[in-house]
């Protein structure tokens, strides 16, 4: 029996960090390539999936994939927040990490072809949406209006400034930014992202929304989108949970009847509401 | 069906020991408690002993296990990952039907879902199972409520039923059949099929006399758990009694949550350990950054019973996740073993009050 090379299920594949970029305070992007050429070749992802990343001698953690399936460099963007991510932040180009995956379902691009797309992100909630944005812009003709509504605490905490500039150079990509408090030199909106969402003239029919951010922001944004008339089954989000295996066995990521690692991490709001447990 | 005399039993065990590491029920030398364990001394096997304190799941899913080992040298950037060979033929002798059912639940969960768990599979590959009919229930038992006893129906290589002096033997696999033939067991006449049936019927009807500790008529509770129509007060009442010790998970034949940790060894190598975990622990769902989606204890308790009895979980096991062994009720320092929880839920449905 020939074993599938991908997903990498149990034993991590060794990868080399080729580049590291500071994004915002405490958040870095780590660009990597897989050491075995056949794995590097076979490693294909769907937008919205995640991997289990081993930091040797520290442990393993689940992390979303911000790169597009096509023509985009493989990387992860990680906030220093616990023991393992702190160890990752110590690494330098040339250092090794371990990779298992990709796991999870991914965004349903086939189903939403032809729709308008609204991305609403809060803070580092833009990380798991980045892959989808890049993919959609690579296939711009397949979609209607594409809009990004992005908020953060301050201008310093807006992720992927460089990518955003590139996207803005693309035709037909609308962007709206907001920060929590006024700042000298800031010409965008001030206030929470849900307030900005409420104010904007957004498409409603034939429209899907992708929402990602901290739980409070998430619920407030969903409320606004629903008030505008966007249906629950057209609002997508990607959930985050403590995970140990990535393959539906350790059960740490269970929410009611679902396992985020195999059934998710992408869910519609309608599904989220009926999982049988609070998110 | 075949006959195995009392005198032939040690021969059967001997024969299996030539190929397999033998596990079975024995009395702990210090406490006298019946435990299901490795038997270095085969004469310690006691098929008449009471239901063991622990289920046999640790044999396939150890309390802690090194699932891989690696050495990382930061100076040279060299990584060497070593995959471990866990394959060791094992024979489980004298498995009660509840525990066998629990093992089949684990099989379906670890092997029949989206992904196969390679580490479980390695333990499972070379296993020989000898089940043992409970000719009389023990005080804690309620397998008749959960359709998992008192006799095994599937999943065994050999099944034994004690008839008072000898054992009726049924082979459930080619491996089992081969062993029966190798031992030259005498074929039993068709009448003995009826004898086995009679023994099982007698066992079922004696639950009312001997199995008095627990009752758990689960079907209506299953319905309620699935639909979520259980008042928050019921979960609060249950949650208030939870000590968060995790004992119920550890003695449960079907609980299989685990944690994975990398432990750095003095040798410079790192051992990736998979250890038992329990959904009752507060840290179970806690994420880095201190966000915990399942903070209150009743949320966590609620989850365990949802996992045991709801339809969605039953789909994974092809049956309810409770096998009626009664161990959680014995070990719980509160009073919320599964049978009691089912009682609380039923009481809410029927509107009965009082303790």
Image (cartoon, coloured by chain):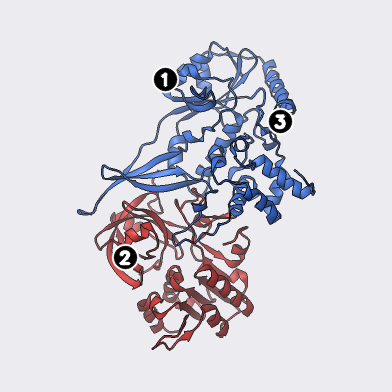
Chain colours: A red, B blue
At mark 3, the secondary structure is loop
Q: Chain of mark 2?
A: A
Distance from disc 2 to disc 1, alpha carbons, whole Å, reads 54 Å
How packed mark 2 is, by other alpha carbons closer than 10 Å (few <14, some 14-19, many 20 or more), is some
Numbered mark located on residue B18 in the image: 1
Alpha carbon separation for disc pair 1 and 3? 41 Å
Q: Are marks 2 and 1 in contact (CB under 8 Å)?
A: no
Q: Nearer the viewer, residue A168 or B293?
A: B293
Q: Label 3: few (<14), some or many (≥20) within 10 Å?
A: some
Proximity of marks 1 and 3: CB atoms separated by less than 8 Å: no
Marks 1 and 3 on same chain = yes
Cα separation between marks 2 and 3: 63 Å
Where residue A37 sits: x, y (%)?
28, 56
* Tag shown at residue A31: 2
Is residue B317 shown above or below B196? Answer: below
Q: Where A67 sits versus A276, above or below? A: below
Q: Which residue is mark 3?
A: B212
Q: Which corner quadrant of the image does residue A83 belong to? A: bottom left
Eye-nearest disc, 1 or 3: 3
Q: Position of residue B94 (x, y in %)?
A: 55, 24
Quarter assignment of residue A7: bottom left
Q: Earlier in the sequence, mark 1 or mark 3?
A: 1
Marks 2/3 same chain: no
């Amino acid at each position: 029996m020939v074993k599938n090379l991908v997903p990498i299920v149990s034993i991590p594949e060794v990868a080399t960090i080729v580049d590291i970029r500071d994004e915002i305070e405490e958040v870095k992007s780590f660009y990597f390539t897989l050491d075995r050429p056949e794995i590097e070749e076979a490693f294909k992802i769907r937008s919205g999936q995640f991997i289990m990343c081993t930091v040797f001698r520290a442990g393993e953690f689940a992390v979303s994939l911000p790169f597009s399936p096509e023509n985009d460099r493989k990387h992860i963007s990680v906030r220093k927040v616990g023991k393992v991510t702190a160890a990752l932040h110590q690494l330098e180009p040339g250092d090794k990490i371990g990779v298992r995956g990709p796991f999870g379902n991914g965004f349903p691009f086939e189903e939403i072809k032809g729709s308008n797309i609204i991305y609403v992100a809060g803070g580092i909630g833009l990380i798991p949406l980045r892959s989808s944005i890049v993919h959609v812009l690579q296939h711009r003709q397949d979609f209607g209006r594409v809009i990004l509504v992005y908020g953060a605490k301050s201008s310093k905490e807006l992720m992927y400034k460089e990518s955003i500039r590139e996207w803005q150079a693309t035709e037909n990509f609308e962007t709206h930014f907001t920060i929590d408090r006024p700042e000298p030199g800031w010409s965008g909106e001030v206030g929470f992202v849900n307030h900005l969402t409420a104010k904007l003239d957004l498409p409603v029919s034939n429209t899907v929304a992708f929402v990602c951010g901290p739980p409070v922001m998430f619920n407030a944004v969903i409320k606004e989108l629903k008030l505008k008339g966007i249906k629950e089954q057209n609002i997508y989000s990607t959930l985050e949970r403590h995970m140990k295996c990535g393959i539906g066995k350790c059960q740490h990521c269970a929410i009611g009847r679902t396992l985020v690692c195999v059934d998710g991490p992408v869910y519609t709001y309608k599904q989220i509401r009926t999982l049988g447990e609070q998110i | 069906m075949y006959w195995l005399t009392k005198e032939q039993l040690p021969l059967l065990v001997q024969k299996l020991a030539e190929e397999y590491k033998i596990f079975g029920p024995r009395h702990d030398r210090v406490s006298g408690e019946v435990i299901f364990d490795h038997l270095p001394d085969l004469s310690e096997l006691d098929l008449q002993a009471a239901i063991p304190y622990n289920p046999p799941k640790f044999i396939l899913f150890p309390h802690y296990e090194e699932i891989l080992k690696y050495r990382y040298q930061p100076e040279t950037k060299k990584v060497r990952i070593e995959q471990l060979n866990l394959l060791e033929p094992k024979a489980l002798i004298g498995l009660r039907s509840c525990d066998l059912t629990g093992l089949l639940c684990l099989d379906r969960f670890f092997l029949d879902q989206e992904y196969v768990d390679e580490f479980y599979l390695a333990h499972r590959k070379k296993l020989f199972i000898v089940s043992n009919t409970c000719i009389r229930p023990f005080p804690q038992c309620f397998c008749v409520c959960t359709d998992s006893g008192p006799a095994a129906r599937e999943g065994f290589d050999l099944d034994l039923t004690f008839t008072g002096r000898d054992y009726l033997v049924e082979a459930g696999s080619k491996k089992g059949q081969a062993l029966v033939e190798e031992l030259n067991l005498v074929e039993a006449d068709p009448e003995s099929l009826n004898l086995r049936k009679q023994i099982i019927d007698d066992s079922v009807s004696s639950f009312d006399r001997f199995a008095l500790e627990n009752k758990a008529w689960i079907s209506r509770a299953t319905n309620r758990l699935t639909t979520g129509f259980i008042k928050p007060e019921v979960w609060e009442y249950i949650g208030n009694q939870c000590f968060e010790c995790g004992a119920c998970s550890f003695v449960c034949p079907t609980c299989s949550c685990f944690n994975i940790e990398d432990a750095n060894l003095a040798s410079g190598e790192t051992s990736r350990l998979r250890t038992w975990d329990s959904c009752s622990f507060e840290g179970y769902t806690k994420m880095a950054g201190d966000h915990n989606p399942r903070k209150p204890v009743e949320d966590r308790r609620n989850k365990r019973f949802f996992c045991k009895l709801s339809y969605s979980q039953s789909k994974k096991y092809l049956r309810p996740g409770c096998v009626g062994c009664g161990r959680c009720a014995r070990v719980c320092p509160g009073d919320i073993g599964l049978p009691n929880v089912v009682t609380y839920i039923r009481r809410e449905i029927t509107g009965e009050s009082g303790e």
